Amino acid sequence: QVQVVESGGGSVQPGGSLRLSCSASGSMLSIYLMGWYRQAPGKQRDLVADVTDGRINYADSVNGRFTISRDNAKNTVYLQMNSLKPEDTAVYFCKVGTNWGIFWGQGTQVTVSS
């Protein structure tokens, strides 16, 4: 019913930037939440940032470096990632809350290394 597709991951040096995109599609789709989570090897999947009911929430580890934004007309959410650190290395997943339920993207790899 709902498809969630991420893009924009890649490999960068510390201090570099990336911009992730996530688009959701489906019939009669109403979205109330869009957000980003990440999961490093051997670790739990944790919140990075989300937008719910017009309110934005950031993890302390990324606050001030990452910016989340939504384009409601395109059912798309973005994550601008600046001043990247090696500890930001993870698979980044898009989460979408809809009238049909919660859906996840396939994930996109972000690698930060010297």
Image: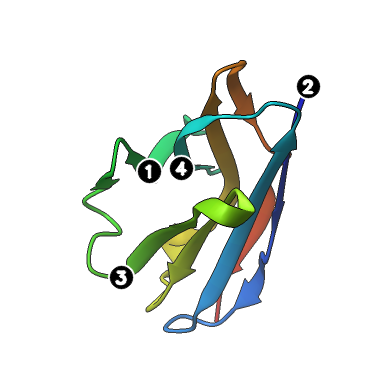
The residue type indicated by label 1 comes to Asp
Determine if residue 41 is in view: no
Q: Residue at x 37, y 79 (%)?
A: 83
Left or right of 112? Residue 62 is left
Among numbered discs 2 and 3, the one appearing first in the sequence: 2
Residue corresponding to mark 4: 35
Instruction: Please identify the quadrant where the N terminus is shown.
Output: top right
On residue 50, which mark appears?
Answer: 1
The residue type indicated by label 4 comes to Gly
Q: In the rendering, at what x and y percent does residue 32 appear? A: 44, 31
Q: Residue at x 51, y 51 (%)?
A: 72
Q: Residues within 10 Å of mark 2 (few under 14, many from 20)?
A: few
Instruction: Please identify the quadrant where the C terminus is shown.
Output: bottom right
Vertical arrangement, residue 41 with respect to residue 102, above or below: below
Q: CA distance from mark 2 to mark 1?
A: 22 Å
Vertical arrangement, residue 101 with respect to residue 67, above or below: above
Q: In the rendering, at what x and y percent does residue 2 appear? A: 73, 28
Q: Helix, strand or loop at disc 3?
A: loop
Kindly indicate whether the residue at mark 3 contacts the one at mark 1 (C-beta within 8 angstroms). no
Kindly indicate whether the residue at mark 4 contacts the one at mark 1 (C-beta within 8 angstroms). yes
Q: CA distance from mark 3 to mark 4?
A: 16 Å
The residue type indicated by label 3 comes to Arg
Kindly indicate whether the residue at mark 4 contacts the one at mark 3 (C-beta within 8 angstroms). no
Where is residue 21, by image quadrant?
Answer: bottom right
Q: In the rendering, at what x and y percent does residue 62 appear? A: 30, 59
Kindly indicate whether the residue at mark 1 contacts the one at mark 2 (C-beta within 8 angstroms). no
Q: Residues within 10 Å of mark 3 (few under 14, many from 20)?
A: some
Residue corresponding to mark 2: 1
Among numbered discs 2 and 1, the one appearing first in the sequence: 2
Left or right of 85? Residue 5 is right
